[in-house]
Amino acid sequence: MKKSVLFILLPLLLVVSACQGKPPRISGMEWSLLEIKNTADGVYREYLSFFARTEDPDGVEDIEDFYLSSTDSRLFWHLSGENWTKRSANNETWIGSTALTAPAGIPRGAYKLQLIDRGGEEAVDSIYIDLPEFDQNEYQPNLRIVPELELSGDTGSIRGNGGPYQCVAVNSEGEISAVFETPSSIFDTSNYTKSAGSGTLQWYVFEFESDRGWYIGSGPY
């Protein structure tokens, strides 16, 4: 009788084992804090740009959910394949977003990242944002200059603290069409408008403040 039971159970165990996938892996993380002065209302808003380098033996497409949560608050962001940005370079795949934000700004402190695949397997890692709190009062014309951009025809002119500057162009669908760094305060926008097709680009300009640890900028233009 015992022998009969073993013959019945063994095939079932083999089937269950064959259906189990392998968990995803987080092999790197990159983040930046962005302080953007909106050109429409003059209000500063904080954004967190966060990307994770991902690996999954079952394929990156097997990853379904991306959760980034602030440990000391109830704030979290949930991304999926429908709304995360995917970047591939040198056989590496990064997923994340450049536009994570919250009404009261980005909390400082510890964050936990969870990647969950279709089989429910997960990978977990963490970061710590130890930058100072943003003080808008410091950014007055006579104290600290916020980079600004003026567009005239195909010429973009930047006013700032001397650069280098990071420029970002966003198309009409909200997708990033161009990201580049320039040491010059003048650049030719036609190099980037051609690749955008018939759509109109909106521009943002940033400068990294090493003593604060964030990118300060303005837009859209």
Image: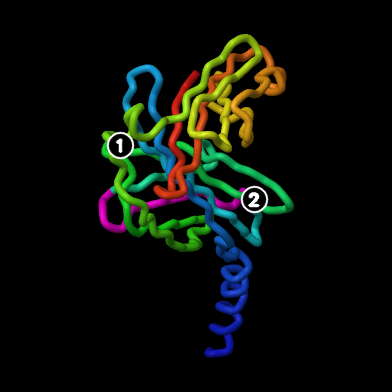
Outermost residue on the bottom side: it is: 2
Residue 10: percent from left, percent from top = 60, 79
Residue 185: name its quadrant: top right
Mark 2 surroundings within 10 Å by alpha-carbon count, few (fewer than 14), some (14 through 19), many (20 or more) = some
Is residue 24 visible to us here? Answer: no
Judge whether residue 61 is colored magenta: yes
Residue 202: percent from left, percent from top = 53, 20
Residue 1: percent from left, percent from top = 53, 89
Q: Which mark is residue 159?
A: none
Lower sequence index among marks 1 and 2? 2
Image position of 194 with respect to 100: above or below:
above
Is 158 left, or right, of 67 in this rendering? right
Is 40 left, or right, of 165 in this rendering? left
Q: Secondary structure at mark 1?
A: helix
Instruction: Please name the amino acid that badge 2 sits on.
Output: Thr
At x 49%, y 56%, the residue is 115
Q: How many marks?
A: 2
Q: Which mark is residue 138?
A: 1
Residues at marks 1 and 2, CA–CA distance in whole angstroms: 38 Å
Image position of 74 with respect to 145: above or below:
below
Q: Which mark is residue 93?
A: 2
Instruction: Please name the amino acid that badge 1 sits on.
Output: Glu
Which of these two is toward me, 200 or 22? 200
Extent of the magenta region: 60-74
Residue 13: percent from left, percent from top = 57, 74
Which of these two is toward me, 179 or 121? 179
Is residue 32 visible to us here? Answer: yes
Outermost residue on the front side: it is: 142
Which of these two is toward me, 8 or 10? 10
